[in-house]
Image (cartoon, grey):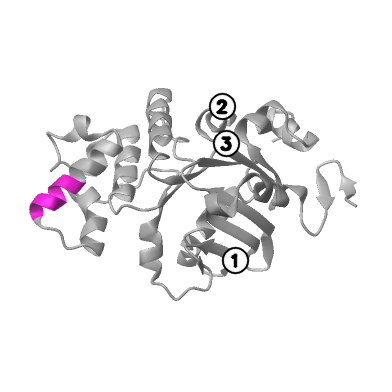
Amino acid sequence: MYKYSHPYLFQTETTIGNAMSNELISLQDTKIAINNLDFFYGDFHALKNINLRIAKNKVTAFIGPSGCGKSTLLRTLNRMYEQYPNQSAQGEILFEGENLLTTETDIALIRAKIGMVFQKPTPFPMSIYDNVAFGIRLFEKLPKSELNDRVEWALTKAALWNEVKDKLNQSGDSLSGGQQQRLCIARGIAVKPEVLLLDEPCSALDPISTMKIEELISELKHDYTVAIVTHNMQQAARCSDYTAYMYLGELVEFGKTKQIFDKPKFQRTEDYIRGRMG
């Protein structure tokens, strides 16, 4: 029996939301399985018993108010949090049969398979070409002709090639904000990952650049599994196949995006989506 201590805060061992993805997504269709995940910033319990399946070749959107844990959850998926002190995760994140939280696999290889694009574009201080080639050179020894082909392929996949093909030697910083973000996506997919994590990729972009990124996301899911954090409800509705609503470190509701936005199961999900809470 679920006990409500506040209209937006109920206490359970596992929220109903935790069970929803298991009902919707079979193990066969699962790319990443998150089981009993807890995350801590020092003593602060930021993620509480998260259970979630992320479907292969689909876009999963994470929504919720600031501080709810959605970006934290994204950073656990490739252990990006290890870049910072006093942060720890417990539980399971299963990817290719391994628990990413305990595996001895080189963390660089994990991040090559599970790439990440951040809120603010982060081009490296080098040429457009070298930005894309950087990761390839780390993991593969390709002849120059094959490296050129891979760079062109990645920039094409990121819908940027036609805009930069005549200025590959220019600095990545010379591009517009929207172009820089697509450059970061090209850099991420150049190493041919299996999963792409997008942490509010359009928050600093103008509407036209945002539209291009959204169109790109719809294309990328044919080749990759995509997880995106966004504060833009319309963007989540347009881009994603599944949506997870989080609040105070808990997974409140998970479902197909159309169901979440048209007929959410919980009042507090509806209140957030309709703008009645932030």
Residue located at (68% from left, 53% from top)? 249
41 versus 164 height, above or below:
below
**Element marked by disc 1:** strand
In this rendered view, identify the residue nearer to me: 110 or 211. Answer: 110
Quadrant of residue 137 in the image?
A: bottom left
Q: Which residue is mark 2?
A: 234
Q: Name the outermost residue toward the bottom.
A: 104
In this rendered view, identify the residue nearer to me: 164 or 51. Answer: 51
In this rendered view, identify the residue nearer to me: 166 or 243. Answer: 243
Count neighbours of disc 1 (C-alpha within 10 A) and say few if under 14, some if 14 to 19, many if 20 or more.
some
**Could you tell me the amino acid type at mark 3?**
His
Q: Is residue 13 left or right of residue 216?
A: right
Q: CA distance from mark 1 to mark 3?
A: 27 Å
**Could you tell me the amino acid type at mark 2?**
Gln
The percent position of residue 198, horizontal first and vertical second, equals 46, 45
The mark closer to the camera, 1 or 2, is 1
**Could you tell me the amino acid type at mark 1?**
Glu
Residue located at (30% from left, 37% from top)? 158
Q: Name the outermost residue toward the top.
A: 208
Q: Which residue is mark 1?
A: 92
Count neighbours of disc 2 (C-alpha within 10 A) and say few if under 14, some if 14 to 19, many if 20 or more.
few
Q: Which mark is residue 231?
A: 3
Residue located at (48% from left, 35% from top)? 203
Quadrant of residue 61 in the image?
A: top right
Counting residues from the start of the chain, the first of labels 1 and 2 encountered is: 1
Residue located at (42% from left, 36% from top)? 217
In this rendered view, identify the residue nearer to me: 118 or 261. Answer: 261
Q: Name the outermost residue toward the front.
A: 28
**Which residues lie in the magenta part?**
144-150
Callout 1 touching callout 3 (CB < 8 Å): no
